[in-house]
Image (spheres, rainbow, N blue to C red):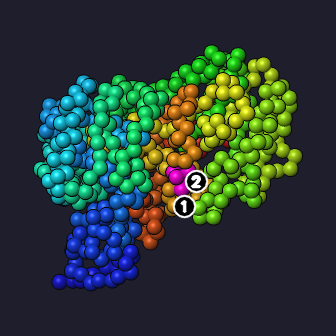
Amino acid sequence: MDSIQIKFIDSDKTVTCAYGTKASTLLDNFGIPIANIAAIRENNEIRPLGTNLLVNAALEAVPLDSPEGVMIYRRTLSFILAIAAKKIFPSDGVYVGHSLGSSYYYTLSSGDKPKDSDVKKLEDEMRNIVKENLPITFKYISYEEALQLFKENNQMDTALLLEQRSTPLIKVNVCKGFMDMYVQPLLERTGLLCSFELTPYGDGFLLRFPGIGRGDTIDPFKDEPQIFKVYNDYKKWGKIIGVRVVGELNSKVGKRTISDYIRIAEIHQARKMADIADRIFEKKDKIKMVLIAGPSSSGKTTSAKRLEIELMVLGLKPIAISLDNYYRGTAETPKDEKGEPDYECLEALDVPFLNQQLQALYRGEEVTLPVYDFKTGSRKEGGGKKIKMESDNILIVEGIHGLNDALTNTIDRSTKFKVYISALTQLNLDDHNRIPTSDNRLLRRMVRDSQFRGMEAAGTLKMWPKVQSGERKHIFPFQNTADAAFNSALDYELSVLKYYADPLLRAVKPGKREYAEAVRLLAFLENFAPIPPQYVPGTSILREFIGDSEFKY
């Protein structure tokens, strides 16, 4: 029998084992507690513990408390919830929705609100499955068998998703006789799911779990009513328009009706922005400044420009101010825990100077806006354009700290209107496999970095965890303070981004640490039928990332 060499990166140990050895039989070589291992990283690709090792490989453990391990934990929770729901709601489907803090929101497919007692039964059944410590395996079945299986189990959204696939074999996860399409690795056994809870919420319930870096601790729930409303409105709209899941979007591509859908999606989004402009105009005698903030690649810049146009339609004259021009400079920027400049912290901005200029503008004085040169890491001599506020002017201030009142600490809160921008996609892969909103933004960022900054996909993937860490510190804690929330996601955009991102991701080779994330995103994009970019309107937010926008940036 052929043998292979396995090098364990964590313990710096090398062993010889038989071809086809299961990774799960080698866990004691990693040098960390076996109960803390969620999966393995084989030659930089994350795989389940049940993987058969077929080549010489470098192996690393994926700890449960790592970012990757946390996502594996959450996917596995969703999987056993689907199993339990088959018993508790035998005549009804359970749909996973959006995230809400460290929770996923679920509803019944019938639209009925589940009884609190049924939610408790569902949680009890999940805990029974955990207590049984059942194995979670994966296998391949034929395309025809998978199609028949999902239809018989009334998993019609999953069956529809298969229309985009053309492979003869379909990978599925298996536990307690239940099969579901393999999306990403799951834990090896149900007994590892020690921390979760179900809580009635809205017209459904929340599946709650520990946050990143919180171990087994489930923090008290912090409601986000404004974000929830935006999500819920878009979910209802998606149901009305007939695009709730990726398979329904793919059907429109296949039937050549996608151009009509794109127009509808763009007009719907434009109306949402017009609604925000109307709210601002109603208080035009009081509001002097609109602050726009959101996480990376949420489309803040284009959203700001579109809001300016909507306000101009109503007779106001917006003046745009970019917070990027108020950076103190590289020499004065605070350092992070690694000793590197932390450009995302509030202290990286010259807050006193910003407030000085805002106060002057409020008094009707003329100011000269600064201009920051990112190449030199300092402000340009002479500054930029001169501005002065008249009675029909309104300031539009855009930047990641816009929602934090510490940014404009000398300005009366009643004169400010804060808008939170984020890409909150309402699409699911199917009834219980959701699309993380951060994936939407990551793909936007990757395409933009390539189009306009000459950065390879591996570079974007490498910096993304730090970007997300900054968002958790500086943006998400303030999202509930916004006066309005705007969803910049377009449900068709992932099919367009696939056109650009697919070749970028394929350029990330196995020797790079970022290969695991590239493989994950490629597998994710495989579910989407591509949409050529020529279908995207010139004023679309998506143009901020793919290019050829009618706006000037």
Instruction: Identify the residue position indicated by label 2 in the image.
Output: 449
Q: How many marks?
A: 2
Query: What crowding class fits label 1: few (fewer than 14 Cα within 10 Å), some (14-19), or many (20 or more)?
Result: some
Give the SS element for disc 1. Answer: helix
Quadrant of residue 52 within the rendered picture:
bottom left
Q: Does the magenta stretch include residue 269?
A: no
- Residue drawn 22% across the image and 27% down it: 115
| 98 relative to 266, above or below | below
Q: Which residue is drawn at 38% across and 81% down?
A: 12
- Up/down of 366 relative to 192, above or below: above
Quarter-of-image position of residue 414: top right
Is the Cβ of the residue at disc 1 closer than 8 Å to that at disc 2? yes
Which residue does the numbered mark 1 point to in the structure image? 459
Where residue 222 sits, quadrant-wise, is: top left
Q: Can residue 536 be seen in this view?
A: no
Per the rendered image, the range of residues in magenta is: 466-470
Task: Give the quarter of the figure containing the C terminus.
Answer: top right
Q: Which residue is drawn at 31% across and 64% down?
A: 37
Q: Which amino acid does label 1 sit on?
A: Gly
